[in-house]
Every structure is written in C-alpha cells, then in structure tokens.
Amino acid sequence: EVQLVESGGGVVQPGGSLRLSCAASGFSFRHFTMHWVRQAPGKGLEWVSLITWDAATTYYGDSVKGRFTISRDNSKNSLYLQMNSLTTEDTALYYCAKDLYGNGFNSWGQGTLVTVSS
Amino acid sequence: DIQLTQSPSFLSASIGDRVTVTCRASQGISSYLAWYQQKPGKAPKLLIYAASTLQSGVPSRFSGSGSGTEFTLTISSLQPEDFATYYCQQLNSYPLTFGPGTKVDIK
C-alpha cells in the first residue's frame, strides 16, 4: 500500500523558513515524479512544485518561485520542500503527492499544516 | 498560465440525481485534464485522468469527457458518499493549475 507521510509543519513568523519532509513507502519511490500541493484554510488546491524521479528537473508555481526549493533523497525514500521568506499567504496545509506518469496525482499524504503568523 | 474555471461553484442535488460539472480552460489543453474528489478533512482523490479514463477503483457512475477547452465530469446516479468538492486540474503545461472547485451538497 502506498503511504505518504508529511512532517515539518508548524508556526513560523513572516520572513522565516521551514523545511517540510514527506516519507514515502509502498512503492518504488526512486522511479516516480513527486509533487507538493497546498490548500489554504477553506480554499482550493494550489500546485506548488514538482521534481522528476532523478531530481534533474524541477518546476514551481508562480507564487513560490525563488523562495521554495524542492528536493529528494531516493536513498531515504524522502521528498522535501525548503520554504524561505515565508509570508502569511503561505499559510496552508501542504500535501505531497505521487505522480501518475504525468496524468495526475494518484496518491496523497494527509498533509502538514504551515501557519505563518507573527 | 492556463486558467481553469468550473461551473457551477455549488450545486444541491438528491440521491439518484444525474450531476454534471463543467471545467473550462483558458487555452487548449488537449486531453490533459484530471478530476479529483475531496471530502472535508481528507486529501483529494483522483477520479478521472486523461479527461475520460477512470482511475482504478473508482465507481463506474463517474465519467469524464471533453477535450481542448471544455470538459465535463458526470455522476450518473448520485450516492450519499459522493457529496464532496470536485476539482479539475490541467496537466498540459507548467505551472500546473487546478480549478476553483465545485461543491456538491445534499438537497
């Protein structure tokens, strides 16, 4: 069974940094593109970032480009999101998700909550 | 960036109703569209990909159609467990984008 477990969320002040992690199990992590998606409280889904299986290619949403960095460690079956220069607009539940060969996201974690507040 | 709109934003329906949700893209995306269901407090669940392909394990009452800029998600006979919010997503180009969602509620 595919499992994705996010961690690292918490309360951070504006301008601060946070690193999220996603531990993957139940599938061959090193073979799959992975994503981060976020959802602000009471709002819709916003795609954040993608990293290919070999980490050779990354993409970012416009609102996080230049501030967030996605990475992975295939030896640890782990996905990461380094978030810098956080603003209140970054407050959201952050999900990691497994890619279905470019056709959508067929497995999701339960999310980790990031709150940016002074 | 490709913008997605969904209509309606909210719909009230009864058990057994046929329900249709529309998703429109600001430019052509071929068939690179997925549909998700999200229930309160839960992660989204993939229902349909490539506009019309049913994800494994998803009931056959769900179907998708369309290509280019207009797409539909249809639930042929609404069941109690289908009351949720539905999102479309385009995978044609980066940044990937989601529609704003359609909440399906009980009449």
Image (cartoon, coloured by chain):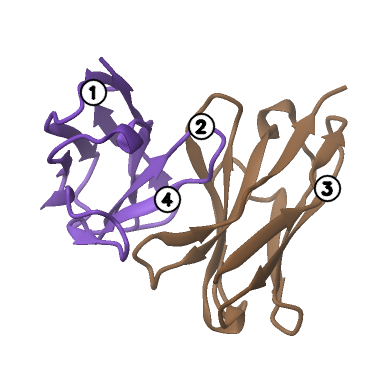
Chain colours: A brown, B purple
Quadrant occupied by the C terminus of chain A? top right
Which residue is labeled 1 in the image? Answer: B8
The chain to which mark 3 is attached is A
| Residue B30: % across, % down | 18, 58
Which residue is labeled 2 in the image? Answer: B40
C-alpha separation, residue under disc 2 versus residue under disc 3: 26 Å
Which residue is labeled 3 in the image? Answer: A18
C-alpha separation, residue under disc 4 versus residue under disc 1: 20 Å
Which is nearer the eye, A18 or B84? Answer: B84
Q: Which amino acid does label 3 sit on?
A: Leu
Q: Which residue is drawn at 51% across and 32% down?
A: B40
Badge 4 local density, few (<14 within 10 Å), some, or many (20+)?
Answer: some
Which is nearer the eye, A16 or A105? Answer: A105
The chain to which mark 1 is attached is B
Q: What residue type is labelled 1?
A: Pro
Disc number lying in front (3 or 4): 4
Please tell me if label 3 and label 4 are on a single chain: no
Q: What element carries label 3?
A: strand
State if disc 1 and disc 4 touch (CB < 8 Å).
no
Badge 1 local density, few (<14 within 10 Å), some, or many (20+)?
Answer: some
Q: Is residue B53 visible?
A: yes
Please tell me if label 4 and label 1 are on a single chain: yes
C-alpha separation, residue under disc 1 versus residue under disc 3: 37 Å
Disc number lying in front (1 or 3): 1
Which residue is labeled 4 in the image? Answer: B45
Quadrant occupied by the N terminus of chain A? bottom right
